[in-house]
């Protein structure tokens, strides 16, 4: 029976992990699933652990990422889901092996970090969606992000789950109680993390969410309507300021792709944007697409638009997403998914400069769309002097899928991680203002035309997580590799306090 029960549990546990993420927010499920996964692979062979890891990964990622295919079709979605699931093969093997060693609950947490570190870097720069940390924005462990970023939060989730697994195994009552108490302590420690140290300065920020038109327009007509919506929203803000019904902001933020028509090549667009910014009277951050010098490719660009002098400083997205913004191995990809490749005739080229833009005396850290998922990009901006983060995003093509809420959760984690107020300007939603403790102060729902005007705090202080950078990830990942290498050479029956592998299998089934 074990031959069929374990794979079934692996599939069920992988599917259940989705419920820990947005929009469901049952954060405790991530801990329980990490514990179940630990028990599943315990005492198994390398081949069995690899298979269980693969089944778990497929059951998680295939239903977790269907929004990827809304614009490019099912082949890229399934290819991405399978690629991500493959990382759970070494995860299953590693979690199985380290349970042969003392203090293995901590080592299980380190192995999870190693898997997430690899997945966030390869292939093509990685894809961190689905990190355990991103499931915890409504839970008590979120505060740990200020000490060790997303890495420490993920480590805490996996370790807490492993401690519960340790408690389930047949042990004396005192050890079992200690394991449960340890898991509770790991879960609860985040609530005592001190809040961000703000410098007392504030800024008033306005977010314009112009939204998108209804269906039936061709591409060029739709782009023009989107631009018109943001122009109209900015002119309305200016009128309300003059009438005394709206606060005068210090800066205005438009979302990614708010002007998909290149203003530098279209004089009418340049004039229209300049008029709107002049009307509101403050610098405005515009999201646009600018061709490269050779006109062969494009750059996803944030432009600081002055009410007096027009376009000025720019930030170019440093991490374009493969297959969504550029096509690796274009010739091969076109044979596999021709429609998706033809819909992206030009590649987005990565910028090479850290994003910190000065707007009205404030240092703004622009983060464009999926960049918020990567640890290094927001951190680079804060280290370079950003006093608050501005996430500009266009999620319109993903409809009403969970993608938007999941991306907002990443912004919430970054706010805590760096002790920064974070604003999210979304083309069609969800635009939001996030406080340094991760709370959403105000938001605009999907596909609504609206604005937010909010006073936010500014900070020049660096959290421990910002200062440590990648060190926790490297140390935990290296620790996992060393532990796996040692465990590989150790027979499970040699551990004095562990039963033989055959007995372990029965215990897992009994625990189930």
Image: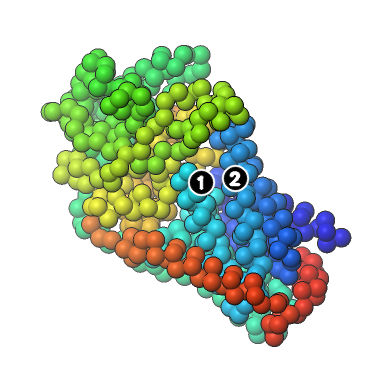
Left-right relation of 71 to 507: left
- For residue 210, above or below residue 405: above
- Which sits in the foreground, 495 or 453? 495
Which class describes the residues within 10 Å of circle 2: few (<14), some (14-19), or many (20+)? some
Numbered badge on residue 83? 2
Q: Nearer the viewer, residue 432 or 63?
A: 63
| Residue visible at 50% across and 23% down in the picture | 343
Q: Which element is circle 2 on? A: helix
Q: Residue at x 64, y 80 (%)?
A: 177
Q: On the image, which quarter does residue 350 sit in?
A: top left
Which type of secondary structure does the marked residue at label 1 adopt?
loop
Q: Position of residue 218 (x, y in %)?
A: 46, 13
| Quadrant including the N terminus | bottom right
Query: Seen in the image, is 226 located left or right of residue 151?
Result: left
Q: How is the image coloured?
A: rainbow
Q: Look at the image and tell me whether residue 35 can be seen.
A: no
Q: Residues at badges 2 and 1 in contact (C-beta under 8 Å)?
A: yes
Residue 301: assigned label: none
User: From mark 2 to mark 1, how far is it between C-alphas?
Assistant: 9 Å
């Amino acid at each position: 029976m074990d031959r069929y029960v374990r794979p079934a549990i692996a599939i069920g546990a992988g599917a259940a992990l989705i419920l820990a993420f947005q929009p469901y927010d049952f954060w405790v499920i991530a801990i329980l699933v990490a514990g179940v996964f630990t028990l599943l692979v315990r005492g198994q062979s390398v081949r069995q652990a690899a298979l269980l890891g693969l089944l778990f990964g497929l059951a998680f990622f295939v239903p977790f990422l269907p929004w990827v295919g809304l614009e490019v079709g099912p082949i890229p979605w399934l290819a991405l889901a399978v690629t991500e699931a493959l990382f759970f093969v070494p995860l299953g093997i590693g979690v199985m092996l380290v349970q042969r060693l003392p203090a293995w609950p901590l080592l299980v947490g380190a192995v999870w970090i190693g898997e997430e570190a690899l997945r966030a870097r390869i292939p093509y720069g990685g894809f961190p969606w689905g990190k355990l940390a991103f499931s915890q924005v409504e839970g008590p462990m979120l505060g740990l992000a200020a000490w060790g970023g997303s890495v420490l939060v993920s480590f805490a989730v996996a370790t807490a789950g492993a401690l519960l697994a340790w408690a389930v195994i047949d042990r004396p009552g005192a050890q079992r109680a200690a394991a449960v108490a340890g898991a509770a302590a790991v879960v609860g420690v985040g609530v005592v993390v001190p809040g961000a140290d703000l410098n007392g300065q504030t800024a008033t920020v306005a977010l314009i969410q112009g939204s998108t038109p209804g269906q039936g327009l061709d591409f060029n007509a739709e782009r023009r309507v989107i631009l018109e919506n943001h122009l109209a929203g900015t002119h309305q803000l200016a009128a309300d300021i003059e009438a005394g019904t709206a606060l005068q902001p210090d800066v205005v933020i438009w979302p990614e792709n708010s002007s998909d028509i290149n203003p530098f090549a279209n004089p009418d667009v340049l004039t229209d944007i300049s008029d709107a910014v002049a009307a509101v009277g403050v610098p405005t951050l515009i999201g646009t697409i600018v061709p490269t010098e050779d006109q062969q490719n494009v750059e996803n660009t944030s432009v600081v638009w002055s009410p007096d002098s027009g376009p000025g400083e720019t930030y170019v997205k440093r991490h374009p997403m493969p297959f969504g913004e550029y096509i690796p191995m274009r010739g091969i990809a076109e044979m596999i998914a021709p429609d998706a490749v033809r819909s992206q005739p030009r590649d987005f080229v990565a910028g090479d400069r850290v994003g910190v833009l000065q707007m009205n005396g404030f240092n703004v850290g622009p983060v464009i769309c999926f960049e918020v998922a990567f640890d290094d990009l927001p951190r680079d901006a804060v280290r370079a002097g950003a006093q608050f983060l501005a996430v500009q995003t266009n999620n319109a093509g993903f409809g009403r899928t969970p993608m938007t809420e999941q991306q907002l959760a990443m912004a919430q984690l970054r706010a805590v991680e760096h002790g920064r107020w974070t604003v999210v300007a979304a083309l069609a939603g969800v635009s939001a203002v996030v406080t340094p403790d991760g709370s959403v102060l105000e938001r605009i729902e999907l596909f609504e035309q609206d604005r937010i005007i909010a006073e936010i705090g500014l900070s020049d202080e660096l959290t421990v997580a910002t200062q440590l950078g990648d060190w926790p990830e490297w140390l935990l990942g290296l620790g996992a590799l060393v532990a796996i290498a040692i465990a590989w050479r150790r027979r499970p029956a040699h551990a004095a306090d562990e039963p033989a592998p055959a007995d372990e299998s029965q215990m897992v089934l009994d625990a189930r």
